[in-house]
Image (cartoon, grey):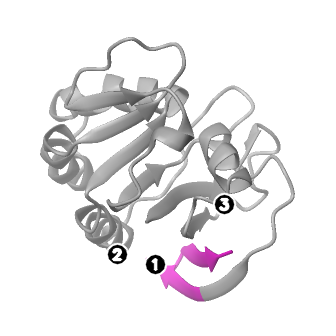
Amino acid sequence: MITHFVHQSVDGFIEGPNGEFDWPLMGPEMSAYSHQLTESADVFLYGRKVWDMMSWFWPKAEEMSQDPHDLRFAPIWRKYPKLVVSRTLTEAGWNAEIVKSPEDLPRDKNLLLFGGSELAAALTERDMIDEYQVFVHPVVLGGGRPTFPNPVKFDLVETRTLDGQVVLLKYRR
């Protein structure tokens, strides 16, 4: 099973016009939900661009942040096995294996895809994502990288409000 876990703005972007990703709200409910979601995964899944961001921050998160969510998630991130889909990386470190193509992903494990519109679009085109968990944050970015670069139809299976501000939209295809 592949679950796509993504934060987006109200206007449908996963990052701002200059690559900004400092806007997601991580209140106590959102943090608890995201920890529950990550603990249900066997493997964390990334595209190369998101991997670059994650592998830069999480190994030294305790030095860069005092946020309770970050402090709790950093050791989990370092421990979990990870797959990075990339045609260009030759090594990744941090308990990560490189996979050259989406077709090479294991289908017998629960994979949690963190963000990444390019990999999500490639997996969606191949009908490989089983569930989309889109967290809509109360911010308008006015441009940037869209969450879904191509038209996609979903079936809404659940909605939930976290911390009185972030709306979870859970979809299946």
Whether pointer 1 and pointer 2 mark residues with C-beta atoms closer than 8 Å, the reply is yes
The amino acid pointed to by label 3 is Asp
* Number of the label disc, if any, that sits on residue 29: 2
Q: Can you give x and y, in whole percent of width and height, for residue 106 in the image?
A: 38, 50
Q: Can you give x and y, in whole percent of width and height, for residue 38 in the image?
A: 29, 61
* Number of the label disc, if any, that sits on residue 127: 3
Left or right: 55 in relation to 151: left
Question: Dot 1, crowdedness within 10 Å: few (<14), some or many (≥20)?
Answer: many
Front label number (3 vs 1): 3
Q: Can you give x and y, in whole percent of width and height, for residue 108 in the image?
A: 34, 61
Above or below, 110 against 19 in this view is: below
Main secondary structure found in the magenta portion = strand
The amino acid pointed to by label 2 is Glu
Above or below, 171 against 90 in this view is: below
Q: Which residues are magenta?
A: 158-173
Q: Is residue 167 magenta?
A: yes
As helix, strand or loop, the secondary structure at mark 2 comes to helix
Disc 1/disc 2 C-alpha distance (Å):
6 Å
Question: Dot 2, crowdedness within 10 Å: few (<14), some or many (≥20)?
Answer: some
